[in-house]
Amino acid sequence: MPLFKKEKKKEEVKINKGIRVDPIPPDYEVLQSYYVREGFAEVVIAAKPGIVVEPVYFVREVELNEQEAKALERLKDFLAKELEPPAIGEEQEVKKILLDSADKLLKKYGRGIGVVDENSKKKIFYYLERDLLGFGILNVIMEDYRIEDISCDGVNVPIYVWHRDYESLPTNIMFTDRSVLDDFIIQLAHKAGKHISSAFPMLDAMIYGKHRLAATFREEVSPRGSTFTIRKFREKPFSIVELIQSNVLSPELAAYFWLLLENKANIMVAGATGSGKTTLLNALSCFIKPRMKIITCEETAELNMPTENWVRFVTRESYGLGATKTGEISLYDLVRMSLRYRPDYLIVGEIRGEEAFVLFQA
């Protein structure tokens, strides 16, 4: 029995309330398709034939029938009441704990939840993991390694992605309810261990998986409502060898950078947004001897040094309102403090203000 059936918009709304997921129009031509999760989540890039081809990124997930959708919601309710938080040291086994608990609840409250067969259970568990541990409706996009950026410009506007092969693409996913989008951004903030609200409507943080999140809340600073952008990073940064193999750097230029780092020269990496500045900084750090002391100062933790002798400093926002800056720790403060640590190498993630003066003075 195939997992992917003819798409029914009516049932999709039940799973993703306040979110519209459009099916692939019959007159669209498929340019590429691939599984993100075999049998459960597929990506299809399709376009309407014509003189100008404008591809669209379609997310297709295994569908739930009405009985399975109800069982999923009931199981979530039971888990919210009975699931115990993982003990210290078990944080890495959260997925196993969740699915084991769900399996026990299905056996315990089978009739109350709705009796499901083994095939239905696999589909329900997929959505449980997606919604409770993953990124909900965006989980397929987040798991697609070909995607570099995910952008939401507000309600009733398609989610846009930056694809390695097709560049900027609209998707078939759209938030249609402002409150649902607001709640989704609050959940993203919680995943990053941060806070966002009408009082603090802007957020710049790192979510798990080492991805960068920038978000605005409601109409405080963005008239079209809440917005967010997720910049995805590889778990393992590009090495200098990979950059050479990809023709990003020539062997001669890489050797020149190596010579500069060996002699502790000052290096400034500049470029446009998304041009690979952080990628290059991470790759160049491979040239630093492992026993040398490295200190990094950043607003959001993005750099990943391949050494143990590394101190990472991150700025902290103010707790106060208005003109007060209670508890704020700026890049200027971090750079000044880092000089007391006697670093062999000092790396500042971004320079836009007075910290530049301290850096060059040092």
Image (cartoon, helix red, strand yellow):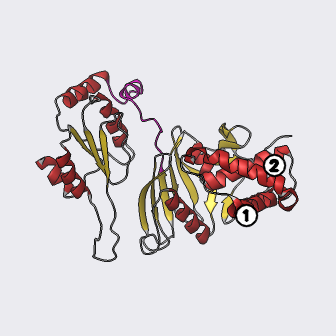
Name the amino acid, label 2: Lys
Q: Is residue 244 magenta?
A: yes
Nearer the observer: mark 1 or 2; the answer is: 1
Viewer can see residue 247: yes
Is residue 265 rendered to the left or right of residue 47? left
> Where does residue 75 sit, x and y in percent of width and height?
76, 58
Residue farthest to the bottom? 322
Judged by its main secondary structure, the magenta piece is loop
> Where does residue 177 sit, x and y in percent of width and height?
62, 69
Determine the residue positioned at 48% across, 73% down.
219
Determine the residue positioned at 50% across, 45% down.
209
> Where does residue 277 sit, x and y in percent of width and height?
33, 42
- The numbered dot on residue 264 is none
Determine the residue positioned at 50% across, 70% down.
224
| 17 or 82, nearer to the observer | 82
> Where does residue 179 sit, x and y in percent of width and height?
60, 71
- In which quadrant of the rendered image does the N terminus lie? top right
Q: Tell me the element at label 1.
A: helix
Residue hosting label 2: 6
Name the amino acid, label 1: Asp
Q: Is residue 281 magenta?
A: no
Residues shaded magenta: 231-250
Viewer can see residue 64: no
Residue hosting label 1: 77
In terms of image quadrants, where is residue 11?
Answer: bottom right
Label 1 neighbour load within 10 Å: few <14, some 14-19, many 20+: few
